[in-house]
Every structure is written in C-alpha cells, then in structure tokens.
Amino acid sequence: MAVIGQTRKEELSNEISQVSCGEVRTFLPLIHQQLDGEISPEEESQLNHHLEKCAKCRQMLRLEQAIKDALQVKLEKKPLPKGLVNSIKLQIKHTTA
Amino acid sequence: MSDTERKRYSEKQKVKIFDEEFLPHIDSMYNFAYRLTFDEDDAKDLVQETYLKAFRFIDSFQEGTNAKAWLFRILKNSFINDFRKKSKEPSKVDYQEVETFYNSDEVDEPITTDLRVETVQDMIGDEVSIALNSLAVDFRTVIILCDLEGFTYEEMAKILDIPIGTVRSRLHRARNLLKEKLWNYAQSMGYK
C-alpha cells in the first residue's frame, strides 16, 4: 500500500513539473511577438523548441490568441456620427475660401 | 529643405489625397477617438480637429505612404494636447510615473495564468470592453493600435513617438494587465 502511494506521489509530481513553467517571463514576450507577426526567425525557433516541451506555455499561447480574437471580434464598433464627413468637408471649404 | 523646394500640392491634388487617402480611415479614427475619450461628442470633435489639421499640413504628407499611421499620430497628439485634461479617466494617474514604473527592470508583476481560454471565449463584447477601458490610457492605446487597428511595432513607434523597444514592453505590460482585469471580472461574475 505504501509502495502504491509513493508511485502515485511521483506521478503527480511529474505531472505538475510537466505543466508548470519557470520560464514564462522569458517566453511570454516571444509569444506576444509571434502573435503580432513581429518575431525574428531565431526567436521563433527558440520559442517553438520550448513550446514542444512546455504545456504551460502552449496553454498561454492559446490564451493570448483567444484574448486577441476576443478583442478583434467581440468589441462593438461605434458607428460614425451622421453628417461628420460633410461637416469636416464644409469646415475645410470655409478655411480655404 | 526650403519652402520653395518643398513639394506643394495643387488644390485639386489636396482634395484627391484627402478623399482617397484620408477619409477611408475615418471609422477607425472615430473608434480610436472614442476609446480615448469615452465620449461621443468629444470623439467627434477630436476626429474633426484631426482632419482639419491633416488638411492644413497636407503638404508634409507624402502621397501614397501610410496615411492611416500619419492620421493616427495627429489624433494622438491632439488628444494629448487638447482633450486629455477633460477625458473621463477613472482616476488621475501620473502617466510618466506609471511608464517609468512599468518599464523598470525591477518590476516583477504577477502574470495571470489561471484565466481559461473557454472563459474568454464565453465573455461578451461588453465585458471585454469594460476590461480594456479600465486600463490606463497609454496601455489601452497600444492594445488598440496593435490588436484592433493592426499597426506594426514600427508604425506604433512613429505614432506614439517612442522607441520600438518601449512599444514591445508596453504591449507586454498592457496585455498582462488586461489578463488580470479579465480574470478579476470573470471571478466577480462567477465564470468557472
């Protein structure tokens, strides 16, 4: 029974170390740069190599992408006030007359 | 370059540039102005002032270049000069102090890692909007310019008149703050 408990403890410990990342501060900026299309080939290679073995950072990438998508898709776009374009053109006409 | 050597557009050229290169961006400009001022009338005035300035200084614009970035820079500067003092900020913030603090290498702000993808996907627009609007203006500006308007870091550096490195670090900070806001909001609303 003690042997089984110890094995389970080791399994949990391995599982936790697999999903925790002590390097998120290093790789989160690179994740941002990759999502923005502003990452160099060297940085991307470094990031992808890390993502292959880090579930936590893969999850962070998914989260950052979801937030970016939410901003782009869910935010309400304000309609342009009626008459604004004409008002601008009229003012320009007056200043150049 | 002297005044005689600087290219000057004819009135016809000016109108053409204005109609074909400046006006197509007015919707984006208005939405950006609204997210800065939180007031429809102020946003309208800000956009109007920006376009008047753009026409006044149209000779300094190179035809066929990035009109959107040029206009956004004028708008940003107009906001800082004329509107910021009366904008509806949630609290008075010394922006230089905030900037200095957040760009310090000593800052080790927590990074929210518990916010779930599904939680974000389940949020509605108003909730995301509240989180974005609650950020200090310099932080929500970089998120708007990058994620909503699609400017590159280089373009943002020119619009905001800051180094590219500062664009990068400010975006990073802004996104961490936004995650924290979304997480706090999700907690308060009972999202799992």
Image (spheres, coloured by chain):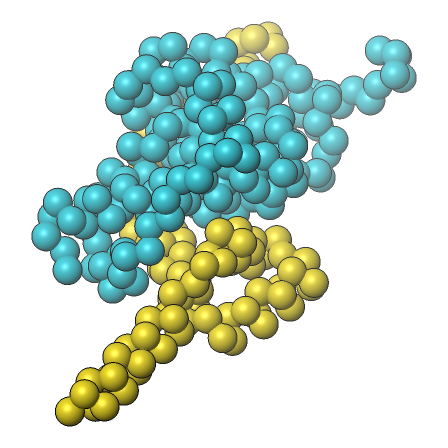
Chain colours: A yellow, B cyan
Please provide percent x and percent y for residue A61.
Answer: 43, 62
Q: Quadrant of the C terminus of chain B?
A: bottom left
In this image, B58 relative to B183: left or right? Answer: right
Please indicate, yes or no, whether residue B57 appears anywhere in the rendered image.
Answer: yes
Query: Looking at this view, is A4 or B52 the one in front?
Result: A4
Q: Residue at x 37, y 48 (%)?
A: B111
In this image, B56 relative to B8: left or right? Answer: left
In this image, B4 relative to A31: left or right? Answer: right
In this image, A15 relative to B138: left or right? Answer: left
Query: Looking at this view, is B102 or B77 the one in front?
Result: B102
Looking at the picture, does residue B85 appear above or below residue B35?
above
Residue furthest to the front: A2
Looking at the picture, does residue A48 appear above or below residue B14?
below
Q: Residue at x 57, y 65 (%)?
A: A47
Q: Quadrant of the N terminus of chain B?
A: top right
Q: Residue at x 57, y 16 (%)?
A: B53
Q: Residue at x 69, y 63 (%)?
A: A41
Please provide percent x and percent y for residue B103.
Answer: 53, 32
Please provide percent x and percent y for residue B59.
Answer: 73, 21
Query: Looking at this view, is A6 or A60 the one in front?
Result: A6
Please indicate, yes or no, whether residue B28 appears anywhere in the rendered image.
Answer: no
